[in-house]
Image (cartoon, coloured by chain):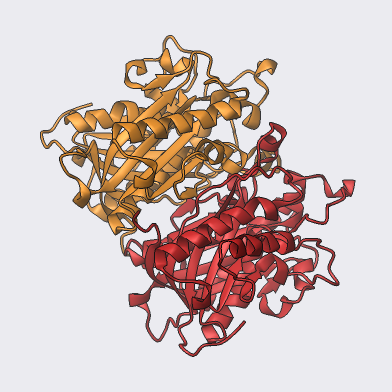
Chain colours: A orange, B red
């Protein structure tokens, strides 16, 4: 079978992150660009607040890269809201060609994969990937009104209030004015898997098999193994799903536990912030990648990293109709522009 | 400003279409591959029926092309349902890497644009684009339960029950075993526009300015004009939106009315099927393109065509919160493999 791994020659040249109050109070606080102390970002609705986060993130990513709207050839964006209105309204003020995505919490990797593919192929000189989630807009859409005070199970996760924007160009376009934060050297779109999980309070378990599937396909098709990467990081499997992924990989003879991390585990304190199994949402992987991991790649602290954002592709209606929760995981290989080896 | 039009070297090698009862009773009936006389496709829910249409469409498109699951390197899919579950569940049985899209009714063009880009760039040998809509799943999600019997205004459109699947390869991969139906020679992603329309009963008016914007940008960047194309066809502007687009284009000195068509106008009979302003939905442009227009390109009856699927990027919630309806239109230039000129 031929390889379904994309060979990419792209570079992330800028990123910006916007988070809510709880994320600002978490261990990664110093790494984020903006926060709102009431999660509203000056807006009247939670949905408008989510859109505003996307607008701010892209605006600041463009400002950091010293580029204007007309310099960005295409943008990929998506979020968790019905009909992806977080992105549609949030990026409405930019006169940039817009391609909407729905990959649930995998959207950050999906957007970066497509943006990197477009610049590698020369269809775009500069492409953007933007995504977001908002705890309160997600709670009322997917679960209960927050006023109801619904109990979450220990395996439940906390949707991150956050947005991340990334600007990507082809390696050959790089020059002294646009130093790269990281190279994107490979990408692999995930296959949707349904292993029978239907517990909406345990999304990590629903997504872990998809992460295993993508990772195993990637190692096989690139003839590499965990030791070839300093860090293997998933988007939001959380404490529960991450443990399942490590177990599944060990069962395949590929122990990743010594270099495994998960954005949902990193963004909140396990001891002092009550988020049960950790963070989740498109904004989780986007803000941790943009705020924390990319600077470590830029500095050479991480040399080579696999980044897999994971998504659960159900809807509240599909669960009520008796369906399981299908999962998907898209993978990117990110490499440091600095060649000395380091650790997370 | 540099061109934001993608130069593509792709070919659509197979397509299949699945429609519901009303579409089967319409003027394009002989051109569709499958129909269900109760819109259920053997399923218990309308949402499952929509998923089943996607599964059937991709299955038959692959059968026509004599290819297997492992031959398809990546698929792009999306629909109108919350969290795009029509696609996620419909394509779950295929072990093909899956990239989910949300472009509302523009999804057919968005998927074909990305699939064509991927094969042109060599990331995939064979890529699929699949999309669907279902009248009854859309009615209850976006409007009223059908039992309520809500009145629709004269500018209202009828969501098409239908799915279309397309298989795309690079021109250089073509051989006698895979004759092309049409070449995809250019693509242009649309910019999201909000011209202040907030009437959910007049989506054509909300989307027409986006179609005008994409068309004007395309003509300018490619230095072509309407006379260079036999047919200019939009996805689902319907009678109302199509009239607005022609007026907007005429005001710009670009009369397209003698070669303009719209899938939403073609799929239902204006006289005998009561759909007011015509058909709409991702399945509208997908089934008319796949069932009716592509065979005309394959036979040379149409030589060169611009296909623009249009989307309205609102949600029921965003409208209740006082937002307008932003529109987007993605464009493809499709050319016949047969070089003699013809007419629609």
- Seen in the picture, residue A105 relative to B73 is either above or below; the reply is above
Residue A312 point in image, percent of width and height: 52, 40
Residue B282 lies in quadrant = bottom right
Q: Residue furthest top?
A: A272
Residue B122 lies in quadrant = bottom left
| Relative depth, front residue between A124 and A328 | A124
Residue B274 point in image, percent of width and height: 85, 64
Whether residue B65 appears in this view of the structure is: no
Judged left or right of residue B2, residue A86 is right
Name the residue at 32% across, 63% down.
B121
| Relative depth, front residue between B20 and B250 | B250
Whether residue B312 appears in this view of the structure is: yes
Name the residue at 57% across, 71% down.
B232
- Seen in the picture, residue B173 relative to A315 is either above or below; the reply is below
Name the residue at 33% across, 54% down.
A124
- Seen in the picture, residue B222 relative to B204 is either above or below; the reply is below
Residue B320 point in image, percent of width and height: 72, 34
| Relative depth, front residue between A184 and B262 | B262
Judged left or right of residue A265, residue B334 is right
Residue A83 point in image, percent of width and height: 61, 43
For the C terminus of chain B, the quadrant is: bottom right
How many numbered discs, if any?
0
Q: Residue furthest left?
A: A340
């Amino acid at each position: 079978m031929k390889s379904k791994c994309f060979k990419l020659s792209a570079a992330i040249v800028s990123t910006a992150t916007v988070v809510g109050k709880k994320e600002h109070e978490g261990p990664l606080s110093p790494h984020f660009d903006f926060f709102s102390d009431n999660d509203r970002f000056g807006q009247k609705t939670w949905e408008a607040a989510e859109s505003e986060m996307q607008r701010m993130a892209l605006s600041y990513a463009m400002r950091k890269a010293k580029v204007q709207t007309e310099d960005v050839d295409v943008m990929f964006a998506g979020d968790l809201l019905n009909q992806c209105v977080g992105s549609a309204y949030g990026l409405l003020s930019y006169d940039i060609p817009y391609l909407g995505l729905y990959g649930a919490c995998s959207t950050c990797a999906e957007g970066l994969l497509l943006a990197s593919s477009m610049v590698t192929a020369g269809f775009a000189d500069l492409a953007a990937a933007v995504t977001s989630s908002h705890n309160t807009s997600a709670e009322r859409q997917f679960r209960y009104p927050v006023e109801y005070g619904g109990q979450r199970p220990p395996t439940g996760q906390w949707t991150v209030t956050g947005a991340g924007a990334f600007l990507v160009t082809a390696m050959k376009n790089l020059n002294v004015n646009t130093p790269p934060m990281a190279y994107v050297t490979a990408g692999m779109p995930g296959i949707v898997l349904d292993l029978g999980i239907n517990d909406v309070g345990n999304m990590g378990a629903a997504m872990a098999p998809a992460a295993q599937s993508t990772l195993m396909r990637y190692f096989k098709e690139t003839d590499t193994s965990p030791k070839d990467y300093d860090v293997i990081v998933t988007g939001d499997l959380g404490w529960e799903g991450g443990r399942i992924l490590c177990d599944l990989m060990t069962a395949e003879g590929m122990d990743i536990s010594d270099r495994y991390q998960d954005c949902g585990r990193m963004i909140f304190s396990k001891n002092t912030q009550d988020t049960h199994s950790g963070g989740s949402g498109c904004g989780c992987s986007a803000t941790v990648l943009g705020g924390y991991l990319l600077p470590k790649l830029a500095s050479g602290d991480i040399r080579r990293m696999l980044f897999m954002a994971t998504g659960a592709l159900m809807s509240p209606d599909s669960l009520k109709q008796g369906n399981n929760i299908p999962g998907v995981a898209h993978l990117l290989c990110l490499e440091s522009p600095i060649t000395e080896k380091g650790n997370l």
